[in-house]
Each structure stands twice: as structure tokens, then as C-alpha cells.
Image (spheres, rainbow, N blue to C red):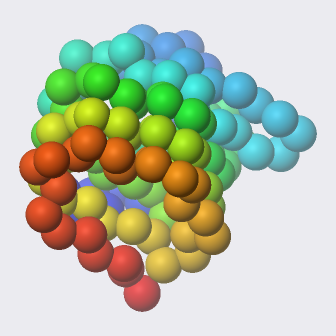
Amino acid sequence: MGFLNKQLKMTAQEANAHGYFFRINGQNCKIMAYRGKESHPVIPAYINGKPVRAIGRKAFAGFDIKGVTLPDTIRVIGDMAFFKTSIERLELPGDILKIEQRAFRLCRHLKEVILKP
């Protein structure tokens, strides 16, 4: 559960097919919601050539995921982004700037958080 592929790139159609709903704002992309079927989703580093910089509010909330692979492009994890998921272990990119309130609230299985260099 880590950085399996820091540079995973997807087109908008591929991202939607994998269950990602996102917003492109200028030169950056933000994951707004996940409705895929993976128990360990791998968030793309780029969608349509734009770096994925943020995970939005409640993007994965309540989803039955055991883990998530974050790309090294992520800078912000939004409020309640992973609220009430089954994540057990998490590796954060060293360049993360902000983890908003309650991002991991009620993640009762979360036992280990690693900040990568």
C-alpha cells in the first residue's frame, strides 16, 4: 500500500471508467468522489495531463476501501475525505501541504501513517 506507480496517468474517460469523479481547475485536478469497485484504489497522478493535487471533501467517505495509493502529486486531503473507511495503513507524499479536519475521522482500522521523504 504505497507508491506503486507515482506517475499513473489517465485520460478523463479512463478515470471515469475506474470510478473517479474529478474537477479540473486551471492546471490542477481534484478528485471529488470515488465510486469504483476496488478495495485498494490507486489514485492517478495525472488526469488529462493535469496533476491530481487534491482529494476533495468526502471523496471516499463511507466507501469500503482497505487502502489507497496516493500519488506524489497530492498536496491536500480534504475534510472527511476518507471518513468511515476501512483503511488500515496510509503512506503520504512528503510534499503534502494540508490534511483538513476530520479527513480520517472514524477510520477505526487505521493503524499506521507514514510520511514519505
In-image side of 93 versus 55 (left or right): left
Displayed quadrant of residue 41: top left
Q: Is residue 13 above or below residue 56?
A: above
Q: Residue at x 26, y 69 (%)?
A: 113
Q: Is residue 14 above or below residue 51?
A: above
Q: Residue at x 57, y 45 (%)?
A: 78
The single residue placed furthest to the right in the displayed view is: 26
Residue 107, given in percent of the width and then of the height, sits at 23, 45
Q: How many marks?
A: 0
Quadrant where the C terminus is found in the figure: bottom left
Q: Is residue 34 above or below residue 71?
A: above
In the image, 23 versus 112, the foreground residue is: 112
Quadrant where the N terminus is found in the figure: bottom left
Q: Residue at x 18, y 25 (%)?
A: 64
Residue 94, given in percent of the width and then of the height, sits at 48, 78
In the image, 24 versus 11, the foreground residue is: 24
In-image side of 2 versus 31 (left or right): left
Q: Is residue 86 above or below residue 112?
A: above
Q: Residue at x 64, y 51 (%)?
A: 53
In the image, 81 versus 115, the foreground residue is: 81
In the image, 104 versus 113, the foreground residue is: 104
Is residue 108 at least partly visible in the picture?
A: yes
Residue 102, given in percent of the width and then of the height, sits at 45, 48
Is residue 74 at least partly visible in the picture?
A: no
